[in-house]
Image (cartoon, helix red, strand yellow):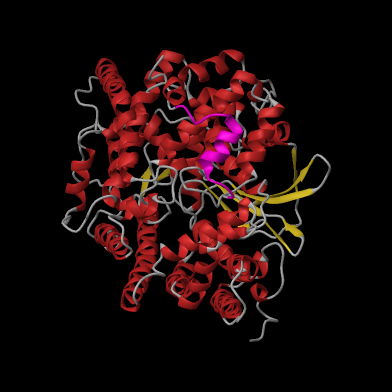
């Protein structure tokens, strides 16, 4: 194949975005698949006795060129997609699924892995090597290597269909999100909206050659409207549209996708000898079993529910006193919560936002990482990016050694999915004596600057940035030999610890002093506001906890039981929510049909891990608080045992090495104000 014209088939370090044509992807992916197959053939064609060095290690290093290309492609499909990229995704997903199955169902390869696995106690291996042997063996056995040929064929078909269904699900949610627009032409209908939100809505309208104010279902547009707009009918209209995504009996309907995905996952688990998809997933999690997850969620539910009900009644009473609202609805929650918060704490996002200019918050995150982990971040303009809004930073240590490259993409645009995430363009590993350093990316959707104001963040957006930056640090500080154990390649219910623990610094006076400065005057955030941020941190925490638990329970219900008798997505979901719902149900809305975390992302049977990781992060931050939030000894322990070690050891062992004890769930309940 002629590689001279295709930048993805040439040697590159940083992704050559500006030189890539969409037509380059399929040839490059096909070539990567071919090279991966050759690498596997080289392992299986050996006649020598299987060892770690000739089987396990080369398998883990194989496919690096394909990984580089697919990471570029699928990251673009999330952050800068279009119809062509989405069509390519549909074409390459089954090709990659077939390769994965061909490798994992390769009997000769598995026999070699099995030999090493069965003899691992008789050979000298490091802890990391032992972990890699275990992980490699399980990844094969858990994906059908021990199956009969006819069952392997069934598994291939299921995996191919699942990969397509997952893509369709995500495309439908994006299409539904993009399809809705609320154009407001009467000024009284934007009453209550902060100036920044009005400006952003006007800019959105102007960008589409429309007069007035345009509101969409993208979070930076949707959330402020639901929180501040006085017009209840328009809040209702927007909330109904948001809740109906994928549930409208049109070409973007996801009901059949949800049922089919759940049933195929169950069938797959049964084929592999597991009671359910959740049993399959949780075998490789800290939680281990669905029973333990249900117990964990219900234990917190018992503590949170009385508080949540009390909070809801107070909110309802407040709405009635203020506006005569007889029955609080879902489209009222954010609005009256914000009003009550202002009344109780005299604190709203509009008071805080001037102190949280995006550039300052970025600098603050960098400054905190510098004080804790000895990292320096310097913006560079020489790295190629996929959009002119993407920023890039060279990351070095205190001695000036190169540690990583960081990409940051902060604003919404068409073709970029909602939400925030961290991802990677190049994995860290040590190969041929060289420590290959990672290329990490964080992607968010924060309000864009307007003609009169820079990008000013809500406090929730500040914590979101710190959250994704915590994930980024997990990637940046990775220091393992094998790519399969590097960075965020850890148990799923451990992966949120670095991200969630970083959010804690946003509430601390000593940390806020580093970056919370008024965008006009440069003055530090007043300490009375910091005090109010801390006091309001547990405001309506019972309701927020109940919401999170409800999603965790919905996820587990889809995946821990036999779903074959379910024929009505909405009816099933309503039954599951019975114990956790506070607001009246909306018949035209459904959560499952747009629940991308579990039907498109990797959180199936894993959504509970947010709460699980909250227990870890509350316990970990208590350790910092007891000894100083910038305590260098504790920061070094966290860097050494959590951030750099990846998946090289069982996460509970790593956590105990850092903390000196197992995590205490009461730390979370104390922080949430649910117990004293």
Can you say whether 3 is above or below 374 in the image? Answer: below
Number of numbered discs visible in the structure rendering:
0
Report the side of 376 relative to 651 (left or right).
Answer: right
For the record, the magenta segment spans: 648-664
Does residue 654 appear anywhere in the picture? yes
Can you say whether 253 is above or below 362 in the image? Answer: below
Identity of the residue drawn at 35% across and 25% down: 542
Given the current orientation, which residue lies at the most extreme front position?
Answer: 122
Quick check: is 87 in the magenta stretch?
A: no
Identity of the residue drawn at 24% across and 30% down: 582
Given the current orientation, which residue lies at the most extreme bottom position?
Answer: 1
Q: Nearer the viewer, residue 675 or 367?
A: 675
Identity of the residue drawn at 51% across and 63% down: 118
Residue 232 percent location from the top left of the image: 29, 32
Report the side of 480 relative to 177 (left or right).
Answer: right
The quarter holding residue 477 reads top right
Residue 348 percent location from the top left of the image: 47, 23
Does residue 450 appear anywhere in the picture? no
Q: Nearer the viewer, residue 503 or 636?
A: 636
The quarter holding residue 659 reads top right
Q: Nearer the viewer, residue 27 or 49?
A: 49
Instruction: Give the position of the N terminus as an image quadrant.
Output: bottom right
Identity of the residue drawn at 59% across and 60% down: 122
Residue 465 percent location from the top left of the image: 57, 39
Quick check: is 651 in the magenta stretch?
A: yes
Can you say whether 417 is above or below 500 in the image? Answer: below
The quarter holding residue 580 reads top left
Q: Nearer the viewer, residue 283 or 133?
A: 133
Residue 571 percent location from the top left of the image: 17, 47
Report the side of 506 relative to 601 (left or right).
Answer: right
Instruction: Give the position of the C terminus as an image quadrant.
Output: top left
Given the current orientation, which residue lies at the most extreme right position?
Answer: 399
């Amino acid at each position: 194949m002629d590689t001279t014209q295709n930048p993805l088939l040439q040697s590159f370090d940083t992704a050559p975005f500006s030189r890539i044509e969409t037509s380059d992807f399929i040839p490059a992916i096909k070539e990567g698949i071919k090279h991966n197959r050759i690498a596997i053939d080289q392992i299986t064609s050996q006649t020598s006795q299987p060892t770690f060095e000739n089987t396990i290690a080369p398998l883990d290093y194989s496919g690096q060129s394909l990984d580089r290309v697919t990471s570029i492609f699928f990251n673009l499909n999330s952050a800068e997609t279009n119809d062509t990229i989405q069509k390519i995704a549909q074409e390459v997903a089954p090709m990659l699924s077939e390769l994965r199955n061909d490798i994992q169902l390769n009997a000769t390869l598995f026999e070699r892995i099995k030999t090493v696995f069965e003899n691992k106690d008789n050979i000298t291996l490091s802890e990391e090597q032992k972990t890699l042997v275990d992980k490699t063996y399980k990844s094969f056995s858990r994906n059908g290597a021990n199956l009969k040929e006819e069952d392997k064929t069934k598994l291939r078909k299921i995996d191919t269909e699942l990969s397509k269904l997952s893509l369709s699900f995500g495309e439908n949610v994006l299409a539904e999100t993009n399809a809705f627009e609320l154009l407001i032409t009467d000024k009284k209908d934007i009453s209550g909206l902060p100036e920044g939100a009005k400006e952003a809505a006007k800019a959105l309208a102007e960008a589409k050659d429309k007069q007035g104010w345009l509101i969409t279902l993208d979070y930076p547009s949707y959330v402020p409207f639901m929180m501040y707009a006085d017009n209840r009918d328009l809040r209702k209209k927007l909330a109904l549209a948001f809740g109906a995504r994928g549930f409208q009996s049109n070409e973007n309907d996801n009901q059949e996708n949800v049922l089919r995905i759940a049933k195929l996952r169950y069938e797959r688990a049964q084929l592999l000898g597991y009671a359910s998809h959740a049993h399959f997933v949780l075998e490789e999690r800290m939680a281990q079993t669905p029973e333990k997850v249900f117990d964990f969620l219900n234990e917190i539910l018992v503590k949170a529910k009385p508080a949540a009900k009390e909070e809801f009644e107070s909110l309802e009473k407040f709405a009635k006193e203020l506006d005569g609202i007889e029955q609080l609805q879902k489209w009222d929650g954010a609005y009256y919560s914000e009003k009550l918060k202002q009344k109780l704490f005299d604190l709203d996002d509009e008071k805080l936002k001037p102190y949280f200019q995006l550039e300052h918050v970025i600098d603050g995150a960098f400054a905190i990482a510098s004080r804790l982990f000895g990292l320096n971040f310097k913006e560079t303009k020489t790295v190629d990016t996929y959009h002119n809004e993407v920023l890039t930073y060279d990351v070095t240590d205190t001695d000036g050694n190169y540690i990583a490259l960081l990409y940051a993409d902060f604003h919404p645009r068409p073709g970029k999915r909602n939400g925030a995430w961290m991802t990677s363009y190049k994995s860290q590993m040590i190969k041929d004596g060289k420590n290959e350093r990672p290329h990490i990316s964080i992607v968010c959707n924060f309000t864009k600057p307007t003609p009169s104001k820079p990008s000013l963040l809500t406090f929730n957006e500040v914590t979101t940035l710190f959250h994704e930056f915590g994930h980024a640090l997990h990637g940046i500080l990775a220091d393992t030999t094998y790519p399969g154990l590097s960075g965020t390649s850890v148990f799923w219910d451990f992966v949120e610890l670095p991200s969630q623990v970083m959010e804690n610094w946003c509430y601390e006076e000593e940390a806020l002093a580093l970056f919370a400065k008024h965008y006009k005057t440069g003055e530090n955030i007043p300490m009375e506001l910091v005090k109010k941020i801390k006091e309001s941190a547990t405001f309506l925490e019972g309701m927020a906890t109940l919401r999170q638990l409800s999603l965790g329970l919905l996820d587990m219900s889809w995946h821990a039981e036999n779903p074959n008798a379910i024929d009505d997505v909405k009816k099933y979901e309503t039954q599951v929510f019975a114990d956790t719902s506070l607001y009246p149900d909306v018949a035209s809305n459904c959560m499952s049909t747009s629940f991308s975390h579990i039907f498109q992302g990797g959180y199936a049977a894993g959504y509970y891990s947010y709460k699980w990781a909250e227990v870890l992060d509350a316990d970990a931050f208590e350790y910092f608080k007891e000894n100083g939030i910038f305590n260098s000894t504790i920061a070094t322990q966290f860097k050494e045992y959590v951030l750099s070690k990846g998946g090289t050891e069982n996460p509970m062992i790593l956590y105990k090495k850092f903390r000196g004890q197992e995590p205490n769930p009461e730390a979370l309940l104390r922080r949430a104000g649910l117990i004293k």
